[in-house]
Amino acid sequence: MPNLFNSKTDKTSYIQSNIKVIKIIAIILGLLIIIGLVILFWGLANSFSKQKNDKKTSSKIIKINQDFTNKFDFHEPADAQLISSSLGPDNQVLLRYLYKGKNTLIILDVNTKQVRSIITLKKGNDNFNFKK
């Protein structure tokens, strides 16, 4: 008669084989983690040394002895109120004023220091029309 009431013999061999497989997997994963950390620190050390060398060469090349600011004087009327300003393409400055109750846009060219155009916006009933 088989041993029906004592099934511990079958389970222990099955559990022991599972534990051996788990140990092998854990050892492999541990080795992979250690190899990955070594490669990580090696890469960080190489990139740090490259940055250190780049800083030495770049500090010798760059010398700031020039004043890069561009001074531009623009006189506006006394009753004009500046609303906003922005820098556009080709070194053009857009100034938005409220002048005599009307919105006025002024486009300045920074290179030539001249007024490119003055645009006055008026309210009307028609849809966007240009008068020539």
Image (spheres, rainbow, N blue to C red):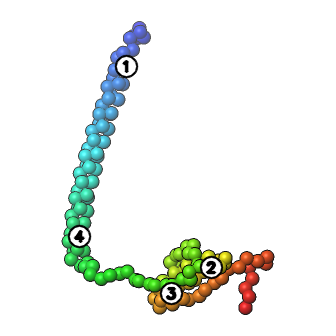
Residue 12: give x, y in percent of width and height: 34, 20
Q: Give the residue type at disc 3.
A: Asp
Left or right for 20, reference 124: left
Give the Cα distance between marks 2 and 3. 21 Å
Q: Which residue is mark 3?
A: 109
What residue appears at the point 33 percent right and 33 percent down from the top-left corner?
22
Q: Which residue is mark 1?
A: 10
Decide: marks 2, 4 in contact (CB < 8 A)? no
- Residue nearer the viewer, 3 or 24: 24
- Return the disc, 1 or 3, that comes first in the chain's sequence: 1
Closest to the camera, between mark 4 and mark 1, is 4
Report helix, strand or loop for mark 4. Answer: helix
Closest to the camera, between mark 2 and mark 4, is 2
Q: Give the residue type at disc 2.
A: Tyr
Left or right for 64, reference 2: left
Tag 2: Cα neighbours inside 10 Å, few (<14), some, or many (≥20)?
A: some
